[in-house]
Image (cartoon, grey):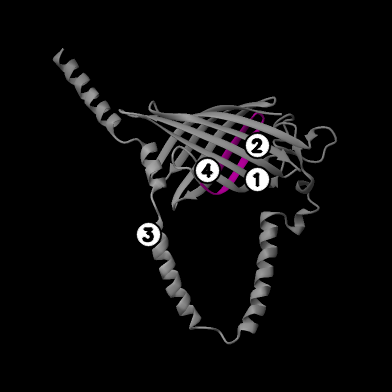
Amino acid sequence: MQRILLVLLLLATVNFTSFAQDGKLKKAKESLNKSTATISTSNSTSSIKRGSRRARNVNNDATFSSFFASIFINLFAYTAYGVAIESPFELDGRMHDAEIANYPYKNSSYGNFIYTDSTNYKIARFDVTTNFVIENSNLYGNNFGADFRFLKRFGLEFDYLYLIEKSSINRDQFSLYSALINYHRIRTQKLDVWFGLGMMHVGSGVNKTGFGVGLGAEWFVAKPISVKVSHKFTNINNQEVNNTKLLLKYYLKNYHVSSGYEHFKIGVSNIDAFSIGVGASF
């Protein structure tokens, strides 16, 4: 009996200690709210010094240099366009005319995209998802998403992340909104790869907005399974905020079930969560 009481007392002590500590969400929001005035001042001072040193080393061959610089810039722009958007070699390829599928695995041969077909594609498609994420019994939340696909290779993606963390004295909350314009760079029947640019906003007392970048891919292994990986990030007061997903998806007609891993970096805090959710395509 004494041993049982001792074990219970030890467990209660451990639980109280971990529960009494400041939560991850509280620390995250405090780090995002920190002022960066000092950092900005020191950076601007050093930039002025570097600028004055460069001014003393002006190149007399400015015309010659600018000529080669313009050539380099044009070559770089042409190459960047080919890598990011479409290269001349792809204009006659099947991916150039790939259409948006009605929904993944309507036919076992294709996922999000289908090569030109007269009946099985859509001009636009609307995908919605909701995923429950949990790190432990005190820290959990939901990740809601909506993706409007249009013009064969573009998409408007909206996401809302809401996290809750219980502590010994209060209940902390965190919210993250994102809106990205996605360009689907690789559009084969088995692989969908995209990148996106837009804005991400942190609420819950931080109330800051930053430029957002997203990357993602979905590999349609074999009907009805796919693997999806994505990463989106922004910078708030020189602190990184990001969300990484690695999900296994099971499709059933125009619906799917997903499960996997999600990682959140919110300022100084890192959260590793199990994710499970559902989605649909219309």
Give the residue type that dot 4 points to: His
Q: Quadrant of the N terminus?
A: top left
Residue under the image location 76 percent in, 58 percent down? 88
Mark 4 and mark 3 lie on one chain; the one further toward the N terminus is 3
Distance from disc 3 to disc 1, alpha carbons, whole Å, reads 36 Å
State the residue position of label 2. Answer: 147
Residue under the image location 39 percent in, 37 percent down? 25
Secondary structure of the residue carrying tag 1 is strand
Secondary structure of the residue carrying tag 2 is strand
Secondary structure of the residue carrying tag 4 is strand
Contact between labelled residues 1 and 2, with CB atoms less than 8 Å apart:
yes
Distance from disc 2 to disc 1, alpha carbons, whole Å, reads 9 Å
Q: What segment carries the magenta color?
A: 209-230
Give the residue type that dot 1 points to: Asn
Mark 2 and mark 1 lie on one chain; the one further toward the N terminus is 2
Numbered label attached to residue 182: 1
**Foreground label between 4 and 1:** 4
Mark 4 and mark 1 lie on one chain; the one further toward the N terminus is 1
Q: Main secondary structure of the magenta part?
A: strand
Distance from disc 3 to disc 2, alpha carbons, whole Å, reads 40 Å
Q: Position of residue 213 (x, y in %)?
A: 57, 49
| Mark 4 Cα shell of 10 Å, populated few (<14), some (14-19), many (≥20) | many
